[in-house]
Amino acid sequence: MAMSQTYGPADEAESIATINRALDSGISLLDTADIYGQGHNEQLVGRAVAGRRDQVVIATKFGFVAGGGGRRLAGEPSYVNAACEASLKRLGTEYIDLYLQHRVDPATPVEETVGAMADLVAAGKVRHIGLSEASAEQITRAHAVHPLTAVQNEWSLWTRDHESNGVLAAMRELGIGFIAFSPLGRGFLTGALNGPDNLAPADMRRTNPRFQAGNFAKNLELVDHLRELAAHKGCSVAQLALAWVLARGEDVVPIPGTKKLKNLEANIAADAIELNDDDLAALDDSFPLHVAAGARYPGKSE
Ligand SMILES: NC(=O)c1ccc[n+]([C@@H]2O[C@H](COP(=O)([O-])OP(=O)(O)OC[C@H]3O[C@@H](n4cnc5c(N)ncnc54)[C@H](OP(=O)(O)O)[C@@H]3O)[C@@H](O)[C@H]2O)c1
């Protein structure tokens, strides 16, 4: 995502090199969306994986429609078909491994949208389907129309809502994989950020409640806990945050975002960190539900 938008400028050559290094290192899942950079990100992924398509699981998403200076949600079957065709073209591929509805469209019953997604599976254009930022009820209703392979929701040490709001329980009951987005807390849980003023002018975190001055300072105290345990474990703060998500279960796949080769290498190394019961208990103590100061997104209550 951030190779095309959200967290300030990106270097295209380093982005492509980073994607290829990820694949060389055995990472196979690449997550994108049609709205990321308004098509730019899918084109970038398509260029990066050209010639090695069979080594990659491409997840892409539809459902946000940009226009008129804002964006709206869409989920009607004709839109789903058109969006899929456009994504296939931008990605330069004949099939999408995992096609996700980015947000359920309140104006279209999820059953209708998933019905259209199931038709794409039957046509061979899509291999697996899922939802993103979905509730337990939406997941259950969608899964009854066509099995969902994965759901992509936010999960990290400072966003643990799905452990107790029924989403994780429903997914485990139905056998659906959890793709954890923003597992590094949009960069906050790396310890690399020290204040909102140091973010690039176009960085969207400037408008994110958790990154506003007062909340930023409170949330930095959370990073201090991580710093202490990371020092004890001999790893970095980011690696510890990622190791915690990796330890959630075999059915949980974190998708940390980075546009930098050096951060990619560091994140890969998090896979080797073993957290014991004492480590996990210490993290539970420091990161209870709703510990973060500020909502996840502007306009949200939590
Ligand atoms: N479905 C949805 O609605 C949704 C929403 C948000 C995100 N996502 C998906 O989830 C992916 C990841 O989420 P995200 O990018 O929002 O958040 P994230 O993975 O939690 O954090 C990314 C931030 O952390 C920094 N970072 C990464 N590794 C680092 C390291 N080792 N040391 C220091 N800093 C590091 C990155 O900067 P550098 O680039 O400089 O390394 C970037 O600013 C996105 O690419 C997107 O595919 C989905």
Image (cartoon, rainbow, N blue to C red):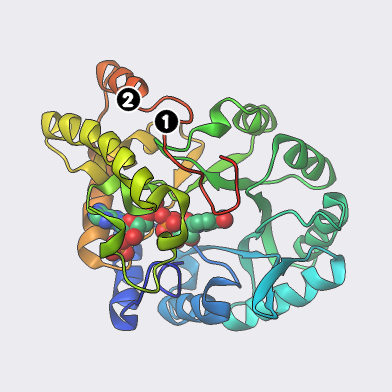
Side of 130 relative to 90 (left or right): right
Residue found at x 59% / y 41%: 301
Q: Residue furthest front?
A: 214
Q: Residues within 10 Å of mark 1 (few under 14, many from 20)?
A: some
Q: Which amino acid type corresponds to the residue marked 1 in the rendered image?
A: Val
Q: Residue at x 84, y 46 (%)?
A: 145
Q: Amino acid at mark 2?
A: Ser
**Quadrant of the rendered structure where residue 173 is?**
top right
Distance of label 2 from label 1 (alpha carbons):
8 Å
- Relative to the observer, which residue lies in front, 241 or 46? 241
- Residue 291: image tag: 1
Residue 124 pos. (x, y %): 73, 67
Whether residue 86 is visible here, answered yes or no, is: yes
Disc 2 element: helix
Pick the front one: 101 or 120: 101
Q: Nearer the viewer, residue 233 or 194?
A: 194
Number of numbered markers? 2
- Residue beneath disc 2: 286
Q: Are marks 2 and 1 in contact (CB under 8 Å)?
A: yes
Q: Which quadrant of the figure has residue 7?
A: bottom left
Where is 85 relative to 180, above or below? below
| Beta carbon of the mark 2 residue lies under 8 A of ligand 1 | no
- Quadrant placement of the C terminus: top right
Could you tell me which secondary element the residue under label 1 belongs to?
A: loop
Residue drawn at x 42%, y 36% is 292
